Image: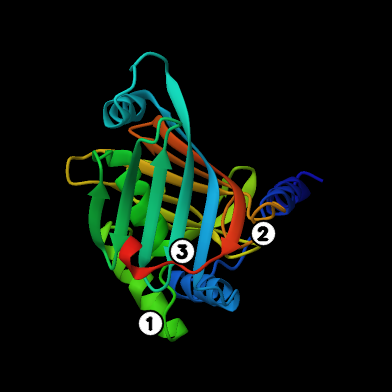
């Protein structure tokens, strides 16, 4: 009986921690993500919703809109526009008619009105991973790989983790201090992007709820951006339309 105890203990450990689970390599994860994105066959969409600024971004928005900086958050009507390939625009306005817009067009950024750093960051990253449809899966995957490489995401490693209670494939470092890119395991839609900018600020973009009847899989219902652990903005999508988007917007 004594000799059986180590074997029983080993079997118990193996039962509790399955061995040999296959983790897709980063190349396969990105290929599946691009195939899922391109299968929607939508090249121009307008997403209307509300944008809420928090903390330091709230103060930046107050200056941009010439509002009182009192309070910890501020909400405004907003619209995210994606025009493939690689052109995105996020407009935010207040009841008095003030408006700012952040634009990313083929990786070139510009602002209309006062620059708000968090606004520019969210447009650039959303555009890179959701707005880059191209002629082939290979081209689309290569474009995302180049973007992740610029953000220093180590795409040679992949593993599983949880984000928002769901399992996701993760490419990059295992710690929050290291850049990483997350893709939901079940849907192969983008879930999270963590990166460090040139000023050593840590940004964290989270994309949640692609199953909402408000947006379907065309766009996540909630987009959140944090800077150095502090929530900077949240975009809540309320309606998605396929739309004609003039080139001059970008």
Q: Nearer the viewer, mark 1 or mark 3?
A: 3
Marks 2/1: CA–CA distance: 25 Å
Dot 3, how many residues are within 10 Å of its Cα: few (below 14), some (14-19), or many (20+)? many
Quarter-of-image position of residue 105: bottom left
* Res 99 visible: yes
Marks 1/3: CA–CA distance: 14 Å
Earlier in the chain: of badge 2 and badge 1, it is 1
| Horizontal side of residue 170 vs 237, given as left or right | left
Specify the label residue 165 is tagged with.
none
Q: Say which residue label 1 marks.
A: 139
Q: Say which residue label 3 marks.
A: 130
Q: Is residue 224 above or below residue 33?
A: above
Coloured how?
A: rainbow
Residue 117: x percent and y percent?
27, 40
Marks 2/3: CA–CA distance: 14 Å
Dot 1, how many residues are within 10 Å of its Cα: few (below 14), some (14-19), or many (20+)? some
* Res 250 visible: no
Specify the label residue 216 is tagged with.
2
Foreground: 67 or 182? 67
Residue at 37%, 13% in the rendered image: 70
């Amino acid at each position: 009986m004594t000799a059986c105890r180590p074997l029983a203990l080993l079997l118990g450990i193996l039962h509790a921690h399955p061995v040999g689970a296959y983790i897709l390599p980063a190349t396969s994860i990105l290929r599946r993500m691009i195939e899922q994105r391109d299968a929607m066959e939508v090249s121009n969409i307008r997403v209307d919703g509300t944008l809420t600024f928090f903390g330091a971004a709230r103060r930046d928005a107050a200056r941009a809109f010439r509002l009182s900086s009192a309070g910890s958050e501020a909400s405004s009507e907003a619209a995210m526009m994606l025009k493939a390939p690689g052109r995105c625009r996020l407009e935010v306005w207040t009841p008095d008619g003030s408006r700012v817009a952040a634009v990313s067009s083929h990786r070139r950024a510009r602002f209309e009105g006062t620059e708000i750093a968090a606004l520019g960051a969210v447009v650039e990253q959303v555009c890179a991973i959701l707005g880059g449809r191209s002629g082939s899966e290979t081209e689309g995957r290569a474009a995302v790989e180049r973007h992740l490489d610029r953000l220093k995401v180590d795409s040679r490693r992949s593993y599983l983790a949880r984000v928002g209670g769901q399992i996701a494939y993760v490419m990059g470092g295992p710690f929050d201090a290291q850049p990483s890119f997350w893709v939901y395991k079940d849907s192969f839609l983008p879930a999270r992007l963590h990166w460090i900018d040139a000023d050593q600020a840590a940004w964290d973009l989270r994309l949640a709820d692609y199953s909402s009847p408000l947006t379907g899989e065309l766009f996540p219902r909630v987009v959140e951006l944090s800077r150095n652990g502090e929530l900077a903005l949240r975009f809540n999508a309320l309606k998605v339309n396929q739309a004609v988007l003039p080139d001059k917007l970008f």
